[in-house]
Amino acid sequence: MTINFLNATFAKSAPSLKEAPQGQFPEVLLVGKSNVGKSSLINALCNKKALAFTSSKPGHTRLLNYYNIDNKIYLVDAPGYGYAKGGFDLDKLFGEMMDDYFTNASRLKLVLVLLDSRRELSENDVDIINFIREKDIDHCLVFTKSDKINQSEKAHLLKHLSEIGVEKDEIIFTSTLKTRTFDSLRNKISSI
């Protein structure tokens, strides 16, 4: 399927799956820590500066945000897990919302697990990766901010991922400063 990622619009914010937009488009879910850059990735993927709201405060996304891509798929931005300003329990919100989503989202075709290239995988990161594997859902680990690591750090990261059973074809490195890094991600989404 050919998807024009430039033809992207915000569709709806939903507090739960029940309020999701109607329609039969396949869904690509984005999950990751609250400060990993999900909104920036959506904007870069679709080459639009303000499609998804970006905030300097981690934990801003607290709803399922749906983006209609070329009337062919929905990108679904989930609330982050981990840190949020103001003592808000993101892990509880993420757990409750995602339990419902993974149990009942019949149109889910791919999960993009966003990870910061500069950081070690957290326990939460490993848990979500293992959960998605156990559910046998197509997924991809998308490492953001890859321009901020050198080749030695990248090799170390790949070695660590290999040790926990992650295959090379599960990994895509992206950087909002290098737009060509998104071609692989667009191809992955289109192929699913």
Image: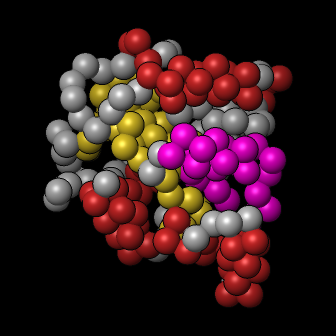
The residue sitting at 59% across, 39% down in the picture is 55
The residue sitting at 51% across, 29% down in the picture is 102
In depth, the one of 83 and 28 nearer the eye is: 28
Q: Is residue 113 visible?
A: yes
Q: Return the x and y of residue 149 as percentages of the image width and height.
A: 69, 77
When the figure is inspected, residue 164 is found, relative to residue 112, above or below; the finding is: below
Q: Return the x and y of residue 96 as percentages of the image width and height.
A: 64, 19
When the figure is inspected, residue 61 is found, relative to residue 191, above or below; the finding is: above
In depth, the one of 151 and 111 nearer the eye is: 111
Q: Quadrant of residue 147?
A: bottom right
Q: Return the x and y of residue 82 as percentages of the image width and height.
A: 76, 37
Left or right: residue 184 versus residue 91 is: left
Where are the magenta residues, as a range?
A: 113-136
Q: Return the x and y of residue 10 as percentages of the image width and height.
A: 32, 33
Please count the marks in the image: 0
Is-magenta flag for residue 134? yes
The residue sitting at 73% across, 22% down in the picture is 92
Is-magenta flag for residue 91? no
